[in-house]
Amino acid sequence: MGKYYFPQNFWWGSAASGPQTEGRVSKDGKGESIWDHWYSQEPEKFFNQIGPEKTSEVYTKYLEDIQLMKETGHNTFRTSIQWSRLIPNGIGEINQQAVTFYNHYFDELIRNGIEPFVNLYHFDMPMILQINGGWLNRETVDAYVNYTKVCFELFGDRVKKWFTHNEPIVPVEGGYLYQFHYPNEVNLKHAVQVAFHEMLSSAKAIEAYHEMNLDGEIGIILNLTPSYPRDEKNAADVKAASIADAFFNRSFLDPSVKGCYPKDLIEIIQDLKLIPEMSEDDLSTIKNNTVDILGINYYQPRRIKAKEIPVDHEKSPMPDDFFDNYQMPGRKMNPYRGWEIYEKGIYDILTNLRQNYNNVRCYISENGMGVENEERFINEDGMIEDDYRIEFVKDHLRFVHQAIQEGSNVQGYHMWTCMDNWSWLNAYKNRYGFIAVDLKKDAKRTIKKSGHWFKEMTTNNGFAD
Ligand code: BG6
């Protein structure tokens, strides 16, 4: 029998984001984000043509939702402020209705013993800034830093955990390489510039926060996808996996934690003649403003083999020119999302951080399993029996526990997500929550079996089996 109990004051909870949960009501003063705009232009791209205007209606239902968080055993919860809600034009006037909403939301969480963790950017560029290039445009960095200062001034007396970005590599991949975010381009030069500006904006926001002496912590949330070579004894596979790791993990991990970019990545970008434009002191800003804390989102590993058919980088270079993805025989899959489930990956990430990143203070900021058509599992009491989700969490927590025994500095575990929410182009296809949201019944909430289990597990601060 195994016992998996966690350190005192471990953070148990879940994560969500403003654009995926809040929804819009008429005259709420919110400006358009790229998602509102994209949906208005091409609704057919979104699963069942469900757009971001309704989502799970947290804007009006947050009081009820916070009670449900209590019932599902949360002591912490992450969401994000929507830049386009707070400052509808990206710069300039502040929307006072947004200030009232976020004040009430955060205060109510605190009153109920749930510490709010607040992220400042979750894929949701204000459209008006995107028209001028979004993260491609250096001015966006200044606009973002100004926005973050407004947030620190308004809410920093109560919010003590801040995050500059959620998964900054995803807007790079989705918007500029693989076409699942607006502006839907394929352009590595732009991708590199966007990534650099996001990273710079993170360092500058950290600098601004520390200058304000607000007695809290600030960090970044990264989706770390460990890159495993097909064959560890095959040097070409190992090299290919290391390049994929440089592009998709170390591109943000190294500057965020160590303050500098990895040498191998710089060499590749230099060879491709794609070094981004920057000002003289940008690199020292990045060097001097590393994170206090790191959030780790973990869903799936990346399996890599050496490139089988060499490509000519001159034409239209892509990261994938340097490696091929590899489907490991016998892998365990989540068929709905199409992602491999590899629980040990979470341990490998934590071990890597302990050994190579000075054991940075961290927490698991997202882990989860999106499943389609969960109504199949509704029992006679109207509850979804999602035993697979309970198994998924336990299987990952065993490895988190092992990492802690070996000295890892991991402080908590957040599930994606609290209640079913809107997943970008996938809209409501795959459901991730501890709490079901019935879109046909005015977004009615019902706790799933996993939510009840989470309450029991977090009350005991772990589990035995
Ligand atoms: C993370 C994001 O990548 O994974 C979330 O931070 C996202 O915004 C979640 O919703 C699940 O992924 P998806 O693509 O199924 O929504």
Image (spheres, helix red, strand yellow):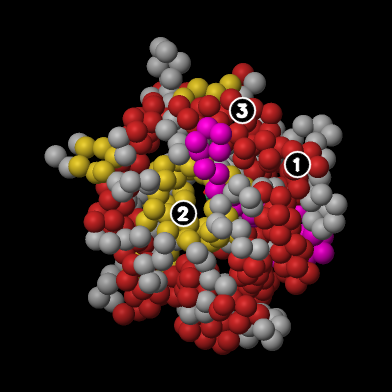
Look at label 3 and name its amino acid: Leu
Q: Residue furthest top?
A: 380
For the residue labelled by badge 1, is the local secondary structure a helix, a strand or a loop? helix
The residue furthest left is: 1
SS under mark 3: helix
Instruction: Report helix, strand or loop for mark 2.
Output: strand
Which residue is located at x 81 percent, y 42 percent? 96
Please tell me whether mark 3 or mark 2 is closer to you in this view: 3
Identity of the residue drawn at 43% across and 20% down: 383
Magenta span covers which residues? Answer: 110-135
Mark 2 residue's CB less than 8 Å from ligand 1: yes
Residue bearing the label numbered 2: 297
User: Which mark sits nearer the N-terminus, 1 or 2?
Assistant: 1
Q: Which residue is mark 3?
A: 63
Residue kind at label 2, given as amino acid type: Asn
Task: Give the distance between the C-alpha atoms of the residues marked 3 and 2, in whole angstroms.
Answer: 27 Å
Residue 371 lies, in percent from the top left, at: 46, 36
39 to 217, vertically: above or below: above
Q: Is residue 167 left or right of residue 141?
A: left
Q: In the rendered view, does 287 fall on the left or right side of 338?
A: right
Q: Which residue is mark 1?
A: 98
Please, is residue 128 above or below residue 441 in the view? Answer: below
Q: Quadrant of the C terminus?
A: top left
Eyeballing the image, is 265 above or below 82?
Answer: below
At horizontal 75% and vertical 41% (from top left) the residue drawn is: 98
Mark 3 within 8 Å of ligand 1, using the beta carbon: no
Whether tag 1 and tag 2 are in contact, CB under 8 A, the answer is no
State which tag comes first along the sequence, 3 or 2: 3
Q: Is residue 422 visible?
A: yes
Between discs 1 and 3, the one toward the N terminus: 3
Q: Amino acid at mark 1?
A: Ala
